[in-house]
Amino acid sequence: MSPKFYDTARVERAVLAQVVLTRDDPAEASDSLAELARLADTAGLEVAGQLTQNREHPDGGTLLGSGKVDELRVVLEQTQSNTVIFDNPLNAIQAYQLGKALRGIRVLDRTEVILEIFARRARSAEAKIQVELAKTQFLLSRIPETEAQQRFGGGGTGLRGPGESHLHIRNAPLRRRITDLKRKLEAIRKRQADKSRVHRQWPVVSLVGYTNAGKSTLLNAFTRADAYVDDRLFATLDTKTRMAWLSPTRQVLLTDTVGFIRNLPHNLVACFKSTLQMAVDSDLLLLVVDATSPRLADHIAVCKKTLKEIGAEQVPHLLVLNKCDEGRASHSVLHATEAYPQAVPVSARSGYGLDVLKQAMIEELQRCCTLWRLPSAISEI
Ligand SMILES: Nc1nc2c(ncn2[C@@H]2O[C@H](COP(=O)(O)OP(=O)(O)OP(=O)(O)O)[C@@H](O)[C@H]2O)c(=O)[nH]1
Ligand SMILES: [Mg+2]
């Protein structure tokens, strides 16, 4: 079995499927499914239906129970869909068994859709290598690891070399490619480290946060970066750094970076380490979230978890509640500002709160950034 990413030239109609386990939070599961619909749309798939099953445990073979797989087949037929996207991660066996049970239907999971979006959006050589690495690792994870799994999964040729299982031999080209890509990324990382040493005359502030929160809009509001802004998930995959003036005498390097999302595939985070390294090496992080999101607390938690995963949890941060547009005293904005009194409410679109944010950045950098603790620098302000 060798899973393929779908043909981007064809228009695909997809049904979303999800297993909600007894231990899962139902509200979060429903939000995750809504997010999957946005991910599918961003990846160019038309969502035609959805199906959820509540279970105590996922089915080891097909994730959904067999009756539900039959139901799924009917929904796929009725909606004339050719793709099913699972919100839950599928292992090698589940992907194979579902593919067999739903013959002719493309079976994807959330990780594959995110990888596809990243592959489409990657522009720089670095982002392209990072995405290819994540995809290759994903393909490798979909090949059964043991001979027993291989038999259950139904693949295999029966060929075997001396001292090595045939699975190992079959995976060798993928493993070689992974080593090659990692080497290339390492070379890029070294070059970036040299560059960032030159940059160190100014404090570095990175925009991090949930995808679609308005990080690139905020970079544009602070600088003339002309960063790409879109009401889609993962509009930005490459870092963009520009000089931003916080006051007539205070300047920082402001960096926009890739957004976070719940269940961001672990190997994708690992592969994007060099892009995210900028955040780790920053003097200050602006943790940007959409104040109007009903899942604000979850989004903040996901961001903090991802920052920990990349080793940036110690970097000082300011929580920025974006999309608090003037005249938009909506219930969610009021609730957000009350729940996070330490956060800075802004509207990157209208400019509301940006002066307060600049002042908060100056104060935080004076407190935490050694570059700004120099007496000559302090007396400038
Ligand atoms: N109403 C409102 N919309 C905003 C604001 N800031 C950004 N947006 C919109 O939110 C959407 C996402 O904005 P981006 O700046 O691309 O968000 P991002 O965080 O960079 O997103 P990714 O790069 O995809 O992670 C766009 O449609 C923006 O126009 C704001 O202050 N108010
Ligand atoms: Mg962006």
Image: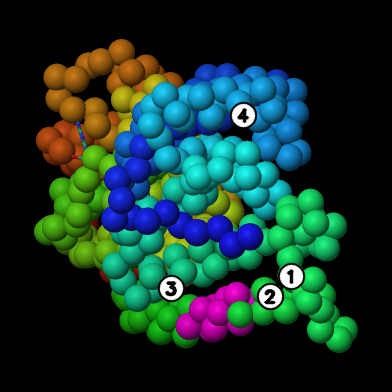
The residue labelled by disc 4 is 69
Q: CA distance from mark 2 to mark 3?
A: 23 Å
**Residue bearing mark 3:** 129
The three-letter amino acid code for the residue at tag 3 is Ile
First of labels 2, 3 by sequence position: 3
Q: Are marks 2 and 1 in contact (CB under 8 Å)?
A: yes
N-term mark: 1 or 4 = 4
**What residue is pinned by disc 2?**
170
Give the secondary structure at mark 4: helix
Query: Helix, strand, or loop for circle 3?
Result: helix
Looking at the rendered structure, the secondary structure element under dot 1 is loop
Q: Which residues are magenta?
A: 174-184
Asked if ligand 1 lies within 8 A of label 3, the reply is no
**Mark positioned earlier in the residue sequence (4 or 2):** 4
Residue topped by disc 1: 157
User: In this view of the protein, which residue sits in the foreground, 293 or 203?
Assistant: 293
Counting from the top left corner in percent of width and height, residue 39 is at 38, 41
Q: Is residue 199 left or right of residue 186?
A: left
Label 3, residues with CA under 10 Å away: few <14, some 14-19, many ≥20: some
